[in-house]
Amino acid sequence: MKPASWSYAESFVAEDDILAAARSRADEVGVAPVGSGVGAALRFLASVLDARAVVEIGTGTGVSGLWLLRGMRADGVLTTVDIEAEHQRLAKETFTEAGIPGNRARTIAGAGLDVLPRLTDGHYDLVFCDGDKREYAAYLKEALRLLRPGGIVAFDNALWHDRVADPAQRDEETVTIRDLGRTILEHEALVPVLLPVGDGLLAAKKEWAPEA
């Protein structure tokens, strides 16, 4: 894909001033939010699912969270987890500026792998992972438990700065993400797709299982 076409696709769904402000806050605190293409894809997935309950690992300053909330149903609740409480405070500012009611965004300060095991099995429509790349395999295991049948798990940075596609790149993060893709491809209960938006969005639907 030519750079001009990629840029056109990435900005096809425009961001508003609220998302621009959230990105500015992210720059100030050194957070790398999802690109606008990934954000639009997340909103689309939440909308297609008519999502009522979503989990996000990696709150940042609320960029991805706001995209998700705008795709969810009006009574949907986003549970967003981040190890940095200050980032979550900034995310709450973003949600407030966007007119999101306070009861629709539940922020939990803590590490993803400490918080996820405490969440309810089979309760969630969508799990979005944008935390520690080295923990992606563990996030997948938790997501499969948390998702209802027909729900979707999605991972940001699935191309990891063009490193995943290069077999010569063997750093820990790259290998973990590459192995994650292979695991999802080979999983009998998942329907996968890798979208070349942003830094790559890897998503998979949890298949409906027949009643025992």
Image (tube, rainbow, N blue to C red):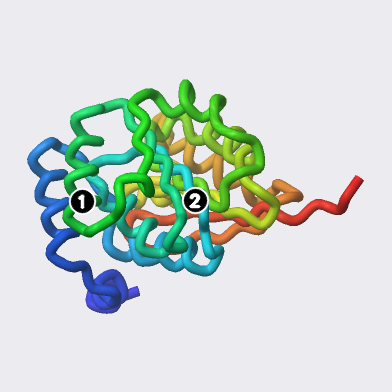
Per the model, the C-alpha gap separating discs 2 and 1 is: 25 Å
Q: Which residue is mark 1?
A: 96
138 versus 168 height, above or below: above
Query: Which residue sits at x=20%, y=35%?
Result: 89
The mark found on residue 110 in the picture is none
Query: Which of the two marks, 2 or 1, is nearer to us in this view?
Result: 1
- State the residue lying farthest toward the right: 212
The mark found on residue 154 in the picture is 2
Q: Position of residue 45 (x, y in %)?
A: 49, 63
Quadrant of residue 25 in the image? top left
Query: Which residue sits at x=26%, y=52%?
Result: 63
Quarter of the figure that contains the C terminus: top right
Quarter of the figure that contains the N terminus: bottom left
Badge 1: how crowded within 10 Å, few (<14), some, or many (20+)?
A: few
- For the residue marked with disc 1, what is the amino acid? Thr
Q: Secondary structure at mark 2?
A: strand
> Between 179 and 16, which is closer to the camera in this rendering?
16
Q: Position of residue 23 (x, y in %)?
A: 16, 52
Query: Which residue sits at x=40%, y=56%?
Result: 200
Give the side of residue 119 with respect to residue 95, left or right.
Answer: right
15 versus 99 height, above or below: below
> Between 96 and 211, which is closer to the camera in this rendering?
96
